[in-house]
Image (spheres, rainbow, N blue to C red):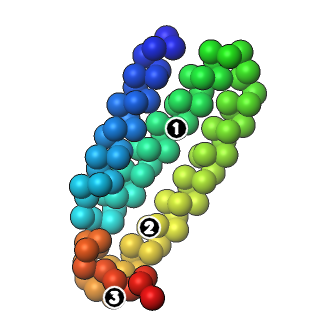
């Protein structure tokens, strides 16, 4: 069970990084970032079960879920605002956040 959890976590992490690097759309980049957060969460749960310290893994998992929810809400709000102004959610076309 331990090996399958780590393999699935590594697969999700690789897919998330690949999607984050290659995506031009903000929504797709946010989805890839959520995949990375899910891989981290799965890794916390798997390793906490291995070391018989379930409480610590569950606390970190709840923290990661809270951070991911805040990131998703903030990222989608920014993407929606940029889409309303520019009519596009492409990352390379938006320079509103640059100084």
Q: Position of residue 95 (x, y in %)?
A: 34, 83
Q: Secondary structure at mark 3?
A: helix
Residue beneath the point at 62% across and 15% down? 50
Residue beneath the point at 35% across and 46% down? 17
User: In whole angstroms, how far apart are the C-alphas of marks 1 and 3?
Assistant: 34 Å
On residue 16, the disc is none
Q: Is residue 54 above or below residue 38?
A: above
On the question of residue 44 being in view, the answer is yes
User: How would you rate the neighbour count of disc 2 (Cα within 10 Å): few for under 14, some for 14-19, many for 20 or more?
Assistant: some
Q: Residue at label 1?
A: 40
Left or right: residue 92 compared with residue 43 = left
User: In whole angstroms, how far apart are the C-alphas of marks 3 and 2?
Assistant: 14 Å
Q: Secondary structure at mark 1?
A: helix
Residue beneath the point at 25% across and 74% down? 92
Q: Residue at label 3?
A: 85
Q: Position of residue 67 (x, y in %)?
A: 60, 54
Q: Position of residue 86 (x, y in %)?
A: 28, 86
Q: Please report whichever mark, 3 or 2, sits nearer to the chain's N-terminal start.
A: 2
- Toward which corner of the image does residue 30 lie, by quadrant? bottom left
Q: Residue at label 2?
A: 76
7 or 75, which is in the foreground?
7
Q: Please report whichever mark, 1 or 3, sits nearer to the chain's N-terminal start.
A: 1
Q: Is residue 2 above or below residue 32?
A: above
Of tags 1 and 3, the one toward the viewer is 1
User: In whole angstroms, how far apart are the C-alphas of marks 1 and 2?
Assistant: 21 Å
Residue beneath the point at 25% across and 58% down? 23
- Toward which corner of the image does residue 83 lie, by quadrant? bottom left
Q: Residues at badges 1 and 3 in contact (C-beta under 8 Å)?
A: no
Q: Secondary structure at mark 2?
A: helix
């Amino acid at each position: 069970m331990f090996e399958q959890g780590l393999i699935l976590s590594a697969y999700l992490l690789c897919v998330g990084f690949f999607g984050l690097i290659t995506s031009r759309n903000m929504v797709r980049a946010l989805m890839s970032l959520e995949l990375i957060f899910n891989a981290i969460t799965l890794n916390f749960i798997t390793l906490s079960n291995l070391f018989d310290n379930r409480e610590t893994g569950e606390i970190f998992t709840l923290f990661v879920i809270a951070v991911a929810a805040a990131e998703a809400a903030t990222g989608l709000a920014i993407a929606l605002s940029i889409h309303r102004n520019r009519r596009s959610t492409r990352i390379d076309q938006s320079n509103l956040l640059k100084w």
